[in-house]
Image (cartoon, coloured by chain):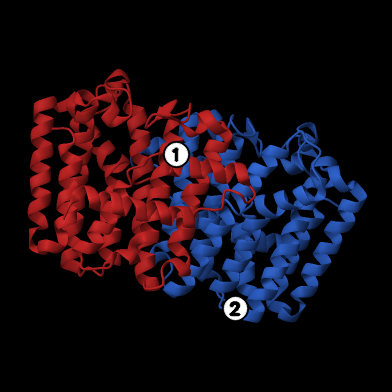
Chain colours: A red, B blue
Amino acid sequence: MELKAYLKQHRQTIDQALEDLLPDKKLRPTQLHEAMHYSVFAGGKRIRPILMMAACQAAGGTIEDVIPTACAMEMIHTYSLIHDDLPAMDDDDFRRGQPTNHKIFGDATAILAGDALLTEAFVVLSAQQNNKNISAETQRRVIEIIARAAGATGMVGGQIVDMESEGTQPDLATVDYIHTHKTGALILASIQAGALLGGADEETFTALSSFGKSAGLAFQIADDILDIVGDQQQLGKDIGSDQERGKATYPAVLGLNESKRRASELHQQALDIISPLGDAAEPLRQISGYIINRSS
Amino acid sequence: MELKAYLKQHRQTIDQALEDLLPDKKLRPTQLHEAMHYSVFAGGKRIRPILMMAACQAAGGTIEDVIPTACAMEMIHTYSLIHDDLPAMDDDDFRRGQPTNHKIFGDATAILAGDALLTEAFVVLSAQQNNKNISAETQRRVIEIIARAAGATGMVGGQIVDMESEGTQPDLATVDYIHTHKTGALILASIQAGALLGGADEETFTALSSFGKSAGLAFQIADDILDIVGDQQQLGKDIGSDQERGKATYPAVLGLNESKRRASELHQQALDIISPLGDAAEPLRQISGYIINRSS
């Protein structure tokens, strides 16, 4: 397979489906709908949806069955970015080179656009017309996995510990907690949802879950490294901004070289776990390699 | 039935179940969990859960089957209050006589506590252990009903139109839109979820839905009237605060007497619709009468 073409094609599939699934911008309340569209179409790379599609393929499933769930995941990811950027939170004026949601629409609308995207994700996940080939029981399990990953014991939990630890000297356990919750949880849930919707048996589901844990952590370490060594254009945010803020990162705790070694080790673990899945898992292998190697 | 005893008993049932379903305050992230508990146990009357239980009874079902879903509804209602009170939104320092969430925990934690309560509601709705007697297909329908009622085309949509219309001279169509969406949607969804979980056939579901629409609007008109004529202790907020803010209310558009007449008419319509349900609907009748007559 040709990775760039795969990424482009699947990104377009997701973009089109998101356009269809989001409330029409022209319908009341127009300002809210515009704010939702603005951040959903602000240049996201659709990493989580594409990982979900690749995991579905790795489990032997059909990509079409996973598209609405993949869009719901992107809506949740987008809501989390809108709320993270708020003045009361990280207070970011730009993301991916564009003004953040509250800079365009104001704080109140940004809060509500985030709330609405999170809620709309569960509309998409539960609406029957989106999930025709999926049994109600599988869809229930998918909703539970995604809700747990996004909530107090997942992403939101990671975000608050991240905020609390800012400016302190975090230890490795805290950095692990933040990363496995704040970003790792949705990555893992994307892969687990893809596996379930792809019809994975218990063994394959377990293997893909282990892959998701190791690869998800490797992605985050790579991201931390990129914040230090990457160039601004590649990342779309200020270099060293994590450092400036005293954010809890792997390089801050382990140093740059040990962080690189650990990312590489986790990546290899992840690849080993899914080697029995053969050719079906090739997209998943190549995508994870691409994400991790951005920083090396 | 003795209404006061019914309300007290069911409120206690919900309070206990919420205590069991919310993340443990002692577990990490403790600050987030504390903030979630604070607002969930800040004196709410549990109107939506109790309406859901009463609708379940009216449909011939067992209250036990509806308790987790009723708790999820209360979590969603609580999240909406936390976000509405934020400085970027209504900027309220007190609710029900107690400091609002952000006054205690700060804006960032209040935003995240709201996000987490909304998400946790969907964990509760989708987790199998909470819904043992419910088919996966029924639970899927319940999740869809609740998500649609809470999102951009429901509560959040009503909230943003409410904000936009502040200080303007709203017309009746706008006041209708705000009330049917901002508060009516969750009331209706509570009654519909109760009906479905109570095993309502199509006819009963339709009747209870019509009841929910009429009664929900009557509740809101009553609330608007209470803001003008009620005493502060009864309502727990400043009298006339809607007027001061130029909020879109029924009395502002229709006048006090016409608002009273309309609430009474809607209430009678609601009662007529469910008269075929007989004794099983008695709790629903009494509760709706209680809510509406607070203002007369």
Query: How packed is label 2: few (under 14 Cα within 10 Å), some, or many (20 or more)?
Result: many
Badge count: 2
The residue singled out by tag 2 in the image is B200
The kind of residue tagged 1 is Glu
Could you say which quadrant of the image residue B252 lies in? top right
Which residue is at the front of the view, A277 or B127? A277
| Chain of the residue where label 2 is placed in the rendered structure | B
Quadrant where the N terminus of chain A sits is bottom left
| In this rendering, position of residue A242 left or right of residue A87 | left
Crowding near the residue tagged with mark 1, few <14, some 14–19, many ≥20 C-alpha atoms within 10 Å: some
- Dot 2 amino acid type: Ala
Residue B52 found in image quarter: bottom right
Foreground: disc 1 or disc 2 = 2
**With B9 as the anchor, is B243 left or right in this view?**
right
Residue B286 location, x and y as percent? 75, 66
Q: Share a chain, discs 1 and 2? A: yes
Q: Earlier in the sequence, mark 1 or mark 2?
A: 1
Q: Can residue A91 be seen from the camera position used here? A: no
User: Considering the numbered disc 1 on the image, is that residue within a helix, a strand or a loop?
Assistant: helix
Q: Residue furthest right?
A: B257
Q: Which residue is found at the position 72% from the left and 37% from the top?
A: B237
Say if A239 sits above or below B111 in the image. Answer: above
Closer-to-camera residue (B164/A30):
A30
| Residue B175 is at least partly visible in this image | yes
Dot 2 falls on a residue whose secondary structure is loop
Which residue: 48% across, 27% down? Answer: A88
- Which of these two is toward me, B183 or A6? A6
Chain under numbered label 1: B
Q: Position of residue B36 (x, y in %)?
A: 47, 42
Q: Which residue is depicted at the point 36% across and 29% down? A: A163
What residue sits right under mark 1 in the picture?
A: B34
Separation of residues labelled 1 and 2 (CA atoms):
38 Å
